[in-house]
Image (cartoon, helix red, strand yellow):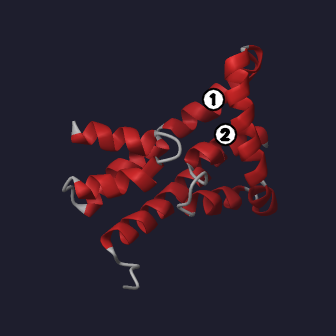
């Protein structure tokens, strides 16, 4: 059950691997296993998001309750897409690599969709950002970056 919690937390928006890795280490998984599981779970939804948004964008806009949520999420993504516009695909990596709220794979996937970026290239650059963010979160969880 603990593994399921870790995978779900890592795959969900907002928490992503920023929540999954510390939880995995708290549960007693070794850091490498924690990193691999959480990175894989965080990357798993990316291709689905990139594909589903394109296929269902028009449906989301027609259902009032979903449209209000979808519009809110779009506004958040629109605010954050300047970095990606400035640096292109590398901007996706940088954006995701910063383990802060609303800078993860979900938001980057939404931004890639809004900017009509190549899905395959976006997937690889977002994945690279997840790998880097995972290293940062794992290091921070273990206290490697601790100044105390």
Q: Position of residue 145 (x, y in %)?
A: 41, 79
**Residue 62 picture quarter:** top right
Q: Is residue 85 left or right of residue 42?
A: right
Between 75 and 108, the residue placed more toward the observer is 75
> Residue 77, relative to residue 29: is it above or below?
above
Q: Is residue 74 left or right of residue 29?
A: right
Q: Which mark is residue 119?
A: 2
**Residue 31 picture quarter:** bottom left
> Residue 51, relative to residue 116: is it above or below?
above
For the residues labelled 1 and 2, the Cα–Cα distance comes to 8 Å
Q: Regarding mark 1 in the picture, which secondary structure is present there?
A: helix
Assess disc 1: are there few (<14), some (14-19) or many (≥20) residues with their C-alpha within 10 Å of its C-alpha. Answer: few
> Residue 71, relative to residue 40: is it above or below?
above
Q: Which mark is residue 143?
A: none
Q: Is residue 108 left or right of residue 34?
A: right
Tell me the residue at 39%/70% (across/down): 140
**Residue 138 picture quarter:** bottom left
Decide if residue 74 is in sight here.
yes
Position of the C terminus, as image quadrant, is bottom left
Tell me whether circle 1 and circle 2 mark residues in contact (CB < 8 Å): yes
Tell me the residue at 74%/38% (across/down): 74
Q: Regarding mark 2 in the picture, which secondary structure is present there?
A: helix
Tell me the residue at 53%/46% (across/down): 14
Position of the N terminus, as image quadrant, is top left
Q: Position of residue 111 (x, y in %)?
A: 71, 45
Decide if residue 56 is in sight here.
no
> Residue 85, relative to residue 106: is it above or below?
below
Return the residue at label 1: 51
Going from N to C along the chain, the mark reached first, 1 or 2, is 1
Count all numbered tags in the image, as a single digit.
Answer: 2
């Amino acid at each position: 059950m603990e593994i399921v919690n870790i995978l779900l937390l890592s795959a969900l928006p907002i928490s992503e691997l920023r929540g999954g890795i510390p939880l995995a280490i708290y549960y007693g998984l070794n850091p490498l296993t924690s990193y691999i599981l959480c990175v894989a779970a965080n990357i798993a939804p990316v291709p689905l998001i990139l594909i589903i948004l394109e296929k269902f964008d028009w449906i989301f806009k027609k259902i009032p309750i979903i449209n209000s949520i979808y519009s809110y999420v779009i506004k958040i993504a629109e605010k954050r897409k300047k970095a990606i516009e400035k640096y292109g695909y590398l901007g996706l990596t940088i954006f995701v690599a910063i383990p802060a709220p609303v800078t993860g794979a979900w938001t980057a996937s939404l931004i890639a969709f809004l900017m009509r970026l190549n899905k395959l290239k976006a997937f690889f650059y977002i994945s690279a950002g997840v790998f880097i963010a995972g290293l940062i979160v794992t290091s921070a969880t273990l206290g490697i970056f601790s100044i105390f």
